Image (tube, helix red, strand yellow):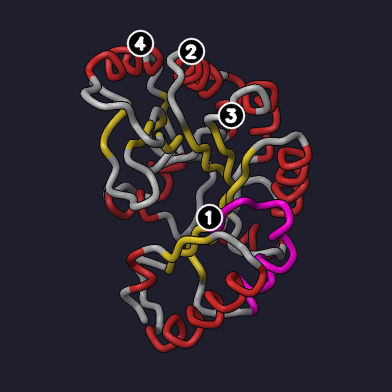
């Protein structure tokens, strides 16, 4: 039985996480969380909600000894996976964070995040992010079979930006093949709709270090030339 949904994060761009689903229905083939937790693919995609997440979150917040700089919703799963459309659990969690005046960042692969646009556009302490590793819907379907189409994510990204919501993109993992995962194209085509990019490598699988060593300096040069704000994650830095 879960006793907490809020915890200290080891991810360098956030200091807390909030996870309230066990597993993820999106079924991404590269999912590091499933590998860390040693779950089978089918066990992982048969995700389970933490139904008392709101009560646990209130308890967690009451125990905080510091005010978080950022709370990532979510770090090991997706807060807008398909069953959330029925349960509405994420909206309840976000409402608690908003009521307490706490900052948070959404990370999702689902276009259904747009259903909570009314929360985001009226709350300046949040930013909404998508994982986008490719601009090709077919590649996305192969790598993230049950997530929203890439084109649908991009449509919602533009809506969010047009409505004044702070946005970000996680380009992670960058697959070791530019035909499959081209971060240069992503920056060029989506930079106008994104306040901040995060780039990361493929973990827990073989990826040629030479590929990242050659690519990352060019990616940094591109972002700097376009005035794009970005973060190169530690694992990717260690590859160059």
Distance from Cα at disc 2 to Cα at disc 1: 27 Å
Look at discs 4 and 3 and give the one toward the viewer: 3
Q: Are marks 2 and 4 in contact (CB under 8 Å)?
A: no
Report which residue position mark 1 lands on: 170
Q: Earlier in the sequence, mark 3 or mark 2?
A: 2
Cβ atoms at labels 1 and 3 below 8 Å apart: no
Residue topped by disc 4: 55
Q: Residue at x 61, y 76 (%)?
A: 222
User: What is the x, y in percent for residue 26?
Assistant: 54, 45
User: Mark 1, mark 4: which one is toward the viewer?
Assistant: 1
Rendered image: mark on residue 99: 2
- Secondary structure type for disc 4: helix
Could you give the CA–CA distance between mark 3 and mark 2, rounded to whole angstroms? 13 Å
In-image side of 36 versus 69 (left or right): left
Q: Is residue 152 left or right of residue 5?
A: right
Alpha carbon distance from label 1 to label 4: 30 Å
């Amino acid at each position: 039985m879960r006793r907490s949904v809020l915890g200290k994060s080891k991810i360098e761009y956030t200091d807390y996480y909030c996870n309230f689903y066990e597993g993820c229905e999106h079924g991404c083939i590269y999912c590091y969380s499933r590998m860390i937790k040693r779950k089978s693919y089918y066990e992982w995609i048969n995700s389970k909600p933490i139904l008392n997440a709101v009560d646990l979150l209130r308890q967690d917040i009451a125990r905080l000894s510091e005010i978080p700089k950022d709370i990532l919703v979510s770090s090991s799963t997706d807060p807008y996976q398909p069953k959330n459309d029925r349960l509405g659990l994420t909206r309840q969690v976000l409402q608690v964070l908003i009521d307490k005046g706490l900052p948070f960042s959404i990370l999702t692969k689902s276009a259904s995040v747009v259903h909570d646009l009314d929360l985001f556009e009226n709350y300046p302490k949040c930013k909404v992010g998508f994982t986008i590793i490719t601009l090709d819907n077919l590649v996305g379907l192969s790598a993230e079979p049950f997530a929203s189409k890439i084109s649908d994510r991009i449509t919602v990204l533009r809506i969010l930006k047009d409505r004044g919501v702070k946005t970000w993109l996680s380009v992670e993992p960058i697959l070791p093949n530019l035909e499959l995962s081209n971060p240069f194209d992503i920056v060029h085509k989506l930079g106008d709709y994104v306040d901040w990019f995060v780039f990361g490598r493929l973990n827990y699988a073989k990826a040629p270090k030479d590929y990242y060593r050659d690519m990352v300096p060019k990616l940094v040069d591109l972002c700097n030339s376009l005035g794009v704000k970005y973060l190169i994650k530690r694992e990717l830095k260690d590859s160059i």
